Image (tube, rainbow, N blue to C red):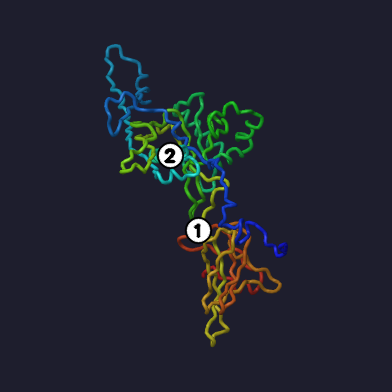
Amino acid sequence: MVLPTSGDYTSIAAAAGLGASDSLAVETSYSLALEWALNNYGIMRQFVSKRPEQVPHPAQTVTMKKWNYFSEAAVTAAKTPLNEVADVAARRLPAVTNVVIEAAEYGDVVEHTEFFEGRALVPFEAAKATTLADQSAKVIDELIQDQILADITETVKAEGIKVLAADVREAGLQFLEDNVPTYGGGFYYFVGHPRVLGDLRAEAGFGGWRVPKEYVDASALKALPNELGEFEGFRFISNNRVRSRAADSDEAQRFNSYLFGAGGLAEHVVTAPQVRVAPQTDALRRFHGLGWYFDMGWKVYEPLAIKVIQATATGADPDTTPCFTWRLIIWALPQQRRKRLQVTWVPEWVTCHCTRPTPVPRVPARRLAVPLRTRGSRSPSPQDPRTAPLPVRRSSSTSPLARTRTWACGTRLRPAPSGVARPSRRPSSPLGRMLWPSRSQ
């Protein structure tokens, strides 16, 4: 018997035999224990504290009314002592405030076939119901945020300014000044993005979050998911489903923070969220549908009891503002006038995030761009020193007819309507002063 000497073994890598890919000896296996992906949850509905009561009949819209108190002027007028022989002039009651809530239908459905059900690797009905329930909760969360932003004017922080402890303290004081009631336990609620709350928790010093929290165990207070604790009369809840505005050419990414007092948000329910099984209407009943449905509406009942703060945060997407570059252009004149050169500074704008090489446009054949460096001299800064730019990068053009060097910096400027400011520092070398453009240019 001759033993194999060339490595002809039974293996998965073999092209033929028992271990080949077309054999049934080795098959791929799958875990039947499926885990859920990471997920966030809608939480806005838990802050609803007003609902219509004693509605006499079904309707498309429901009007809720609020009694109003006498104004301060009426209180001041009533401080006058009465006249013994004169009657008191009658005063009418204040008008009521109407809050109109309109309900609408929402829903979605998924459908599978009998063919798929008979061949599925794992049971999927429970997962289908869970997925639909999560979708309906997120739809409710988005609809509530849409209504709040439609009824409330946002407080927009200046560019680069984050939410600070002073903002939370001021919001609490305004709630108290406006007589906004608290939720159970005597607290208001602050719902913000994790990055916004991260900046707030990192604020140290007197009046900040960290000092009163460093040696306090607030675990007994954290009764809600993702609750971080209490500060300045607010209970803070972290949720990444809060509305945000994407970064653009003017500003970095911004996040909305919602501050709730009791009585601020109202809800009208015609049909509460529910799961519905679709009827089988095909001839052989092979299609199985499952969906969710609700008929509801929301409205800001008391505008003084809800606040929205829009601000950026650490780690947010940066803006896409074009970066500023200076290019020194020496115009090459015709052959008979070669001794005369025209020198100008040309400002250019390129889209750049200052983390990768800046694209440099090609220079026309009749232009020659050179740096301002000579022997024994220092080249001038190609960017305005008042703007505190990032480190300068120098790149070269690929133009075959002219040697080009461009200084590209990460200075975040915007083009002015009437022109662009030039560098204010003049070069020290004679050649640099000769090439430097005059103020009149």
294 on left or right of 246: left
Quadrant housing residue 135: top left
369 over 77 or under it: above or below: below
Q: Nearer the viewer, mark 2 or mark 1?
A: 2
Mark 1 lies on residue: 414
Q: Position of residue 439 (x, y in %)?
A: 54, 68
Q: Secondary structure at mark 1?
A: loop
Circle 1: is it few (<14), some (14-19), or many (20+) Cα within 10 Å? Answer: some
391 over 126 or under it: above or below: below
Q: Which residue is the extreme one toward the front?
A: 1
Q: CA distance from mark 2 to mark 1?
A: 47 Å
Q: Nearer the viewer, residue 117 or 126?
A: 117
398 over 245 or under it: above or below: below
N-term-proximal mark, 2 vs 1: 2
Q: Position of residue 402 (x, y in %)?
A: 57, 78
Q: Nearer the viewer, residue 427 or 401?
A: 401
For badge 2, the amino acid type reads Leu
Q: Residue at x 33, y 40 (%)?
A: 280
Q: Nearer the viewer, residue 439 or 389?
A: 389
| Placement of the N terminus among the 4 image quadrants | bottom right
Instruction: Check if mark 2's residue and mark 1's residue have beta carbons within 8 Å.
Output: no
Q: Nearer the viewer, residue 176 or 214?
A: 214
Mark 2 lies on residue: 132
Count of numbered circles on the image: 2
- Which numbered tag is attached to residue 139? none
For badge 1, the amino acid type reads Arg
Q: Secondary structure at mark 2?
A: helix
Quadrant housing residue 102: top left
Q: Residue at x 34, y 24 (%)?
A: 53
Q: Position of residue 56 (x, y in %)?
A: 27, 25
Circle 2: is it few (<14), some (14-19), or many (20+) Cα within 10 Å? Answer: many
